[in-house]
């Protein structure tokens, strides 16, 4: 843990009044960038429920979304403790919450009430659906958002099965959206002194994210083709089996294909008219994908890496997550270092993927026990 290098958000205070992943992950990123993040924890946060190794509540997911924070345990249903939470919010630059609007209103924590006390506050409210929609009060989970955003439709059309992507994409994309909107609002406040409320609906965020490429022919009115990005929708859009593993080998143009087939020892395919025109015809994409699968086992993954680097063919080995900590690229980038946690012992921590030349981000605090900083943080209030 590094406590010597202030990041670009040094001096910014964030109150994390959120649960599970979407809000906490956004607040953690702001903490990685140097912000002082105070997490106000209710008596029970679901991210602390589940398997743990040493200490109750210190689950893998909790360790991955709550570092660089101080934890204050307050029961917001208790008037006295709720007032302590409001006093902490009075000291903040940013509040992040994903509580439902009705609950916030009942607790006196809605934007209007809080802004009266702290008019410069950036109030970031994340929820499943827009506040002015009929679904505003509905519960939202990553799967419901993947369905509502069209991702499940894309998967069904490409794979023949209406599967959810095997990652909580809606939560994490929304987390990143919280971060960039908060930074934009802080910039506005620096120029004008004006705080504001930001609404980040998960469903709207993921619809916008999905449609960047998948709106496709429906960009035009009337439509000039179907939705769905052709390359991503291709049935052959998959990693290829090498002699000893799996790799992403993506020849993008005729020259790439000819060099690929030559390296695989297939001179007959080098002469194939489908790879000797000016461009690859979309009608041939699936058939050529089958030929990639047929030819890739000719070489090992390492051998393909050399061939593809030589001929500028897009390539990457498939990272096996169980062995990610052994991967040279991961190790050299400190993307999965082993560190000592005060209560959990040796743990692997996900690294910070961005680099600043003047104000480096850093991991200064491990994920805290629930409420471990309550006394110290409330003492700071008393000394203001």
Image (cartoon, helix red, strand yellow):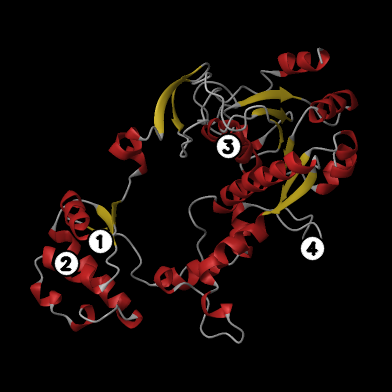
Look at mark 3 in the image and give the residue it sits on: 29
Q: Would residue 88 be found to the left or right of residue 182 on screen?
A: right
Look at mark 4 in the image and give the residue it sits on: 133
Q: Would residue 336 be found to the left or right of residue 59 on screen?
A: left
Which label's residue is closer to the chain start, 4 or 3?
3
Instruction: Tell whether label 2 touches label 3 (CB within 8 Å).
Output: no
Instruction: Tell whether label 1 touches label 3 (CB within 8 Å).
Output: no
Marks 1 and 2, Cα distance to the nearest angstrom?
Answer: 9 Å
Q: Would residue 185 be found to the left or right of residue 22 on screen?
A: right
- Residue 259 is labelled as 2
Q: Quadrant of residue 24?
A: top right
Q: Quadrant of residue 233?
A: bottom left
Marks 3 and 2, Cα distance to the nearest angstrom?
Answer: 42 Å
Q: Residue 219, relative to residue 55: is it above or below? A: below
Which label's residue is closer to the chain start, 3 or 1?
3
Q: Is mark 2 on a helix, strand or loop?
A: helix
Which label's residue is closer to the chain start, 1 or 2?
2
Q: Residue 188, relative to residue 82: is it above or below? A: below
Quadrant in which the C terminus appears: top right
Question: Which residue is pictured at 19% across the width and 83% down the height?
Answer: 273
Look at mark 1 in the image and give the residue it sits on: 313
Question: Which residue is pictured at 19% across the width and 60% down the height?
Answer: 311
Residue 11: percent from left, percent from top: 67, 27
Which label's residue is closer to the chain start, 3 or 2?
3
Instruction: Tell whether label 2 touches label 1 (CB within 8 Å).
Output: yes
């Amino acid at each position: 843990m590094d406590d010597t290098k202030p990041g670009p958000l040094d001096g910014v205070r964030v109150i994390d009044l959120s649960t599970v992943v979407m809000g906490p992950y956004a607040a953690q990123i702001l903490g990685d960038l140097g912000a002082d993040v105070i997490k106000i924890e209710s008596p029970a946060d679901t991210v602390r429920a589940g398997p743990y190794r040493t200490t109750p509540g210190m689950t893998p997911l909790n360790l991955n979304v709550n570092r660089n924070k101080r934890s204050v345990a307050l029961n917001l249903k208790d008037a006295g403790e709720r007032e302590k939470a409001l006093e902490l919010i009075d000291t903040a630059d940013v509040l992040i919450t994903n509580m439902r609007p009705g609950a916030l209103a009942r607790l006196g924590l809605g934007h209007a009430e809080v802004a009266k006390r702290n008019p410069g506050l950036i109030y970031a409210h994340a929820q499943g659906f827009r506040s002015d929609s009929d679904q505003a009060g509905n519960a939202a989970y990553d799967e419901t958002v993947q369905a509502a955003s069209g991702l499940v439709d894309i998967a069904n059309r490409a794979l023949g099965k209406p599967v959810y992507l095997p990652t909580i994409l809606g939560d994490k994309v929304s987390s990143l959206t919280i971060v960039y909107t908060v930074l934009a609002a802080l910039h506005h406040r620096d120029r004008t002194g004006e705080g504001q409320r930001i609404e980040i609906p998960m469903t709207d965020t993921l619809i916008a994210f999905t449609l960047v490429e998948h709106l496709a022919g429906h960009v035009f009115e009337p439509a000039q083709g179907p939705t769905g990005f052709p390359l991503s929708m291709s049935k052959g859009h998959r990693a290829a089996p090498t002699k000893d593993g799996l790799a992403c080998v993506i020849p993008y143009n005729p020259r790439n294909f000819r060099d690929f087939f030559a390296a695989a020892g297939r001179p007959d395919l080098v002469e194939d008219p489908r790879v000797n025109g000016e461009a690859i015809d979309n009608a041939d994409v699936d058939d050529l994908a089958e030929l990639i699968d047929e030819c890739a086992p000719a070489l090992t993954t390492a051998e393909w890496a050399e061939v593809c680097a030589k001929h500028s063919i897009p390539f990457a080995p498939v990272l096996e997550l169980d062995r990610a900590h052994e991967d040279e690229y991961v190790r050299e980038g400190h993307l999965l270092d082993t560190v000592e946690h005060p209560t959990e012992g040796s743990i692997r921590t996900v690294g910070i993927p961005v680099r600043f030349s003047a104000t480096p981000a850093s991991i200064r605090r491990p994920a805290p026990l629930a409420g471990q900083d309550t006394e110290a943080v409330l003492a700071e209030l008393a000394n203001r």
